[in-house]
Amino acid sequence: MAAGSTASAGGPSAQDIEVRRSARRSRTVSAYREGGRTVVLIPARMSAAEEKRWVALMLDKLAAQEDRHRLGDEELAERAAELSDRYLDGLACPRSVRWVTNQNTRWGSCTPSQRTIRLSHRLQGMPGYVIDYVLMHELAHLLVPDHSQRFWNLLAAYPYTDRAKGYLEGVVAAQHLPHQR
């Protein structure tokens, strides 16, 4: 395919694929989702057969990455237990952990008296360390219901706290920016 060309992948959930060739790219191949299509970046010297093989490989790789970020409620509860064991000495033991679709102004919530944690569906598809941070935040609330220094000391055990907070702040900022054409 020529640079900038678009092809449709077969199968029941066909998607647009754009292959971009670059003379500056010598060996690496990468791919990402952009709107409703997949963009695959390849070296300009690559043959049509190599292109086809790499496009298929990169589609599989992206699908696997996306599947890892689509945890169900059961996997979410398992992940919460792992995080509690690793960073909170296993002291935070929620009765339930689940995704919800009615939280549009917060990333997660916790009801310590019922030992329940709910995460906003808006987190689905975000990097794992961000989901883990929100889980850690809510797990810490099972132990400390406020945002006191004791609470933040518990979260300090999670090594990606600052990075995840920055990511979420960026998401919020991007949502409030006017759309540019």
Image (cartoon, rainbow, N blue to C red):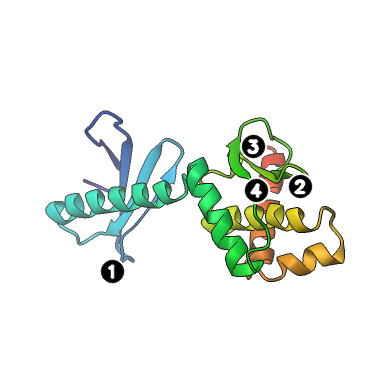
Q: Nearer the viewer, residue 72 or 90?
A: 90
Asked if residue 144 lies left or right of residue 35, the reply is: right
The label on residue 179 is 3
Residue sticking out furthest to the left: 49
Amino acid type of disc 4? Val
Residue highlighted by disc 2: 112
Residue 107 in view (yes/no): no
Q: Decide which of tag 2 and tag 4 comes sooner along the chain.
A: 2
Rendered view: 103 above or below 43? above
Determine the secondary structure under disc 3.
loop
Which residue is tagged 4? 171
> Quick one: label 4 or label 3, which is nearer the N terminus?
4
| Label 1 sits on residue | 26
Q: Between marks 2 and 4, how big is the CA–CA gap?
A: 27 Å
Identity, as a three-letter code, of the amino acid under mark 3: His
Give me the residue at 20% from left, 62% from top.
Answer: 45
